[in-house]
């Protein structure tokens, strides 16, 4: 009888562990940050760099990871239209706006940070856009010596499986001015601080700066953590912007500039940099980053 009782306890433990593992797998969220590179640049009129030659690689790189949420940067008219056409089952948020209305094509020093989310998985609770300037509600506004207008798009999603909510932010900081990058991130962190400390928030983006620079330091001081570091340890992966050269790129500073940060009730379970070619070309001049996380149940 004792042996039978012991055996039953062991089996119960195994079943409980298996159930927990399956539950964690079922409720895992997969998120990707992807700087897809603005289209139509004269410098990209070369084999393998043109949007027409790498757009399918972009889509395939995304589809292989089966993300629930994709945060894109540098989205323009043709890339936006192609993503909307090819990413079936996803809704897009954050392209349209008064700053885009005068134009129908081309690059006018404004590229959008569009968020795609799986509509079967999530219900959109709310969302918005603010500009990283002294006039956050004025589309295309600039401050702090920023080289170009920069903005933050965000969505608040309800997970249909668990009924829990998550807030996702998508940003792209200035590419030249240290002052601008620091002030831009300070503004974002201040806006995020109005939420409860345990409210799940995830921020994706191209920071144009490394883990030891001002934007990341501002985030860490406010209690934010970075998914790749949490999973793989506090060390430098290497570079994520590679100028379409991949592992042949020799940057002056070897650093990641594409990040997925989180705050609140979020538990990362995996994270990796996608540094391989797709269909013999690089999808972009940046490597995409994909992470998986769970929001522990209450």
Image (tube, grey):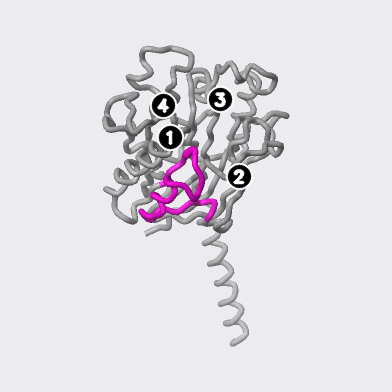
Front tag of 2 and 3: 2
- Can residue 292 be seen here? yes
Mark 4: which secondary structure?
Answer: loop
Q: Earlier in the sequence, mark 2 or mark 4?
A: 4
Q: Is residue 129 among the parts visible in the rendering?
A: no
Give the CA distance from mark 2 to mark 4: 24 Å
How packed is label 4: few (under 14 Cα within 10 Å), some, or many (20 or more)? Answer: many
Query: What is the quadrant of residue 2 in the picture?
Result: bottom right
Q: Which residue is mark 3?
A: 86
Q: Which residue is mark 2?
A: 254
Q: Is residue 279 magenta?
A: no
* In front: label 1 or label 2: 1
Label 1, on which residue?
177
Looking at the rendered image, the quarter that the N terminus falls into is bottom right
Which residue lies under the disc numbered 4?
Answer: 148
Q: Nearer the viewer, residue 5 or 123?
A: 123
Whole-percent x, y for residue 174 in the image: 44, 33
Specify the label residue 39 is tagged with.
none
**Pair 1/3: label in front:** 1
Q: Which circle's residue, 1 or 2, is located before the other in the chain?
A: 1
Q: Position of residue 177 (x, y in %)?
A: 43, 35
Residue drawn at x 48%, y 25% is 75
């Amino acid at each position: 009888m004792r042996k039978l009782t012991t055996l039953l306890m062991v089996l119960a433990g195994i079943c409980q562990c298996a159930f927990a593992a399956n539950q964690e797998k079922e409720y895992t969220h997969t998120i990707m940050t992807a700087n897809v590179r603005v289209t139509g640049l004269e410098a990209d009129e070369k084999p393998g760099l043109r949007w027409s030659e790498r757009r399918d690689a972009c889509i395939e790189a995304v589809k292989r990871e089966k993300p629930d949420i994709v945060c894109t940067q540098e989205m323009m008219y043709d890339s936006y239209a192609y993503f909307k056409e090819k990413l079936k089952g996803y809704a897009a948020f954050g392209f349209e706006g008064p700053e885009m209305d005068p134009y129908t094509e081309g690059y006018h020093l404004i590229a959008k940070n569009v968020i795609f989310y799986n509509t079967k998985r999530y219900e959109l609770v709310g969302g918005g856009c603010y500009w990283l300037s002294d006039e956050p509600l004025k589309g295309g506004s600039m401050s702090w010596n920023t080289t170009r207008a920069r903005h933050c798009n965000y969505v608040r999603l309800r997970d249909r499986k668990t009924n829990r909510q998550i807030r996702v932010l998508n940003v792209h900081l200035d590419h030249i001015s240290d002052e601008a990058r620091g002030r831009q991130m300070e503004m974002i962190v201040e806006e995020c601080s109005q939420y409860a400390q345990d409210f799940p928030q995830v921020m994706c983006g191209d920071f144009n700066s490394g883990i030891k620079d001002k934007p990341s330091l501002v985030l860490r001081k406010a209690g934010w953590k970075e998914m790749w570091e949490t999973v793989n340890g506090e060390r430098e992966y290497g570079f994520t912007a590679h100028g379409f050269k991949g592992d042949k790129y020799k940057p002056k500073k070897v650093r990641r500039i594409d990040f997925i940060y989180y705050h609140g009730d979020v538990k990362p379970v995996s994270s990796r940099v996608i540094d391989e070619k797709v269909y013999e070309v690089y999808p972009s001049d940046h490597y995409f980053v994909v992470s998986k996380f769970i929001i522990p149940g209450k």
